[in-house]
Amino acid sequence: MVCCSDSVTEYVQTIKDLSCEVLDHMAQGLRLPDKSLSCLIKDDDNDSCFRVNHYPPFDDNNNIENSINYPLVEFREHCDPHIITILRSNDMGGLQIYSKDNPWISVPPRPAEFCVFVGEALQVLTNKRFLSVKHRVLANFRKQSRISMMNLTWGEYKKLVFSRRLRDQRLEFFELP
Ligand SMILES: O=C(O)CCC(=O)C(=O)O
Ligand SMILES: [Fe+2]
């Protein structure tokens, strides 16, 4: 068992409440029964996990041209596999999201705001009414560390998915013929 300071415990609880609130709005928008999505993450012993990522400064002045042509990826592109992610970072950029029309859009770092990612499990549960977005983190020209922290729901599900090496094919099982 990991013991955290009171402020971390309080932060995690607040983020969990926020995740539930977002899921309740989604359920309402889809005309689903009240709390039908948030109940999935509400139990006190649910397996949500809190993670802090640290990306050290990176300032490759000697290799600027190369870095423009080949962006240095620190966290490779992926969709979060679980239900919902609530992410917050310091004021260092690097996070990008993928869109078919405009590949790799930079997400401005705004420490006072949260970034919400729909997870693949939520995409499947809502029959693609909400889509999980691919994202990655670049290293290029970061003068100071980027720190991000996120609360990930269904931590055990994520572990299971990756341990089974389903990886890129994992959503194919849910596609209708
Ligand atoms: O650190 C970030 O900004 C993103 C990290 C991320 O996508 C993840 O941990 O799943
Ligand atoms: Fe992610």
Image (cartoon, rainbow, N blue to C red):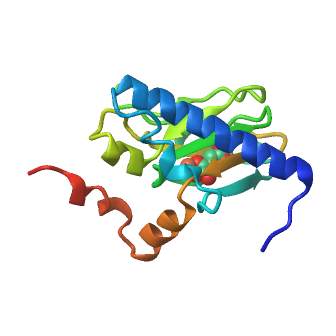
In the rendered structure, the answer to whether residue 142 lies left or right of residue 160 reads: right
Q: Quadrant of the N terminus?
A: bottom right
Q: Is residue 71 visible?
A: no
Of residues 9 and 71, the one drawn nearer to the viewer in this rendering: 9
Q: Is residue 48 visible?
A: yes
Q: Residue at x 77, y 42 (%)?
A: 61
Residue 49 locus on image (x, y percent): 65, 58
Q: Residue at x 63, y 63 (%)?
A: 45
In the rendered structure, the answer to whether residue 21 lies left or right of residue 123 reads: right
Q: Residue at x 82, y 52 (%)?
A: 9
Of residues 20 and 110, the one drawn nearer to the viewer in this rendering: 20
169 to 113, vertically: above or below: below
Residue 39 locus on image (x, y percent): 50, 47
Q: Residue at x 13, y 49 (%)?
A: 176
Residue 81 locus on image (x, y percent): 45, 55
In the rendered structure, the answer to whether residue 66 lies left or right of residue 55 reads: left
17 to 7, vertically: above or below: above
Of residues 13 and 72, the one drawn nearer to the viewer in this rendering: 13
116 to 168, vertically: above or below: above
**Residue 113 falls in image quadrant:** top right
Residue 161 locus on image (x, y percent): 42, 68
Q: Residue furthest left?
A: 177
Q: How many marks?
A: 0
